[in-house]
Image (cartoon, grey):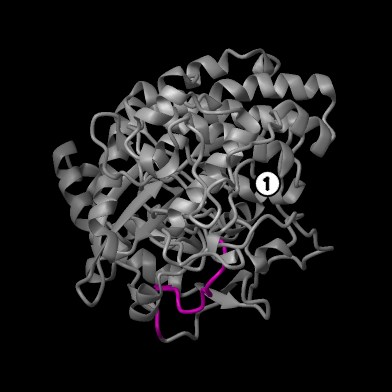
Amino acid sequence: MQHWKRKARGKQIKARERYQPDSDSDSNLSTDDSDWEEAHGIIGQMHGPEGQPLQKKYFPIRYLGKGTFAKVWLVYDVVENTYRAMKVVNPKYFQEARDEIKLMKDIKKHDPDGNEKVIHMVDCFKYSNDDDERFICIITEILGYEVSKVIRKYQEVPIKMVKKITKDLLEGMNFIHKNKIIHTDLKPENMLLTDPGKRIRESIEIFEGFNPHKTYIETMEELLPSDFSTFNKEKKKRIKKKVKKNALQSWQNKMLEHLTIEDLEEEDSNTKKIEIIDNKDNENNDVKLNIEKIDKGSDSDNESNNKSDSDSDSDSDSDSDSDSDYSDIEVDEEKIGIKVVDFGNSCWVDNHLSDDIQTRQYRAPEAMIHDDYDTKSDIWSVGCIVFELLTGDFLFNPERVNNKPGHRHDEDEDEIRDREHLYLMYKYLGKMPVDYALEVEYTDIYFDEKGRIKGPRDDRKKYKKVNYYPLEQLLENEYSFTKEDSLKIASFLYPMFKYIPKERASAEECLQHEWLRDT
């Protein structure tokens, strides 16, 4: 019997306490869709028609993680002899997944080899389980941990690493923006390391120990006619096509004689481990997508398909997560690279799919005050991410209304929190240009006739006076950066934080900034 388990955790590193996630947020990376969990404890047998691997080629090896809208698996491509990630989308969001695929096909058209700093889709297909429910499966390259986990590992990421991550992020944005695509939900959870990481490498190494490719080739050869070598090219092609179906069935049966892959719970329900065991005595050779044992609050270790709601929060530091040990996350500080993932909320410049965009802490002002948004909204999010990488804290994290004592329930809580959010922008970036504040759609909701932020009904003067605290002072005083570094960082960030989108720096302009020249 062969076992593989994660190594015992070492000394815990407690992450900086940042916030508590909204209980009603629908875009949290590690929040369950309870209806899906209850209805799909097991999502059908993990094989295609007649017991073959999915799409006659993809064999699941390991569950990697989940989001509200999708589960992700490490799979082996039997035909191509390679390893991929497979995202299985909740059937409730079938149409949204189709929209995501349209965008990813557009990206692939402009980047057929996957060289850009965005995730590369290899394949996609529909899959029906035993209950005839339709799932969309998206096959992508394998990537590693979320950048949010890197932030929690370091708390304040070394500046050299921040520059490398920032450069990759901006290169990814420059690519999609030039192709008229807006991501609309940039955040550290939607940025993955290009290095798959030790746990995935170990899973592949174990699976390779069973010689999957050699077994497939031998199985094919066993099923070919003895006089196959005498056939002409066309006949060989026809014979191979016929043999392939039986070969895949036989290959899978041979593999399952030796192993099964299961999700197991540890005593700590927020961590997962995989056990690969000898399966010779197992009467049931079906590989299943087992999600019964994946608890609420557990993190996704790979990409997921998140959908922002009107006031969604990033939840990368839930209670259970803040006490986790991230020392097992390997980061090569010299070679670190990232790719942008999750285009489930994305759209085209000339075809917006939603008016409600961006996770709260990375939300641009135009998304709150209902001005038209474009690629520059992504740039605002980049600025927020850079600050978070450098400091371990959010730059803008307005307090939840329901956490405030005595708040009025007859006022719209989103609007109250938006005002608090705008106040923080005024505090660190200065006041919004009056002309712009007074011309947007929601000017009467958020601003008075002088462009000042309106306070809540019980305190209309609350935001009349804002004590300006510029970024360079914030960085120097609160995070101990030198004055020189603080000024350089601030000069890099300010162009991303222009209130008027058309005045905001583009990704290409940001890449030319002197702060990135040594990267």
Place residue 353 in its image quadrant: top left
In the rendered view, tell whether residue 497 sits above or below residue 284. above
Q: Quadrant of the C terminus?
A: top right
- In percent of width and height, residue 516 lies at 65, 18
The residue drawn where x is 40% and y is 70% is 33
319 and 459: which is toward the camera:
459
Q: Quadrant of the N terminus?
A: bottom right
In the rendered view, tell whether residue 321 sits above or below residue 312. below
**Residue 309 visible within the image:** yes
> Which stretch did the figure color magenta?
284-299
| Horizontal side, residue 30 vs residue 76: left or right | right
**Residue 500 visible within the image:** no
420 and 203: which is toward the camera:
420
- In percent of width and height, residue 475 lies at 76, 32
| Horizontal side, residue 388 vs residue 177: left or right | right
> Circle 1 is placed at which residue position?
150
77 and 511: which is toward the camera:
511
Q: Is residue 288 magenta?
A: yes
Looking at the picture, which amino acid does disc 1 mark? Answer: Val
The residue drawn where x is 50% and y is 53% is 456
The residue drawn where x is 43% and y is 48% is 81
- In percent of width and height, residue 458 lies at 53, 57
Q: Is residue 380 magenta?
A: no
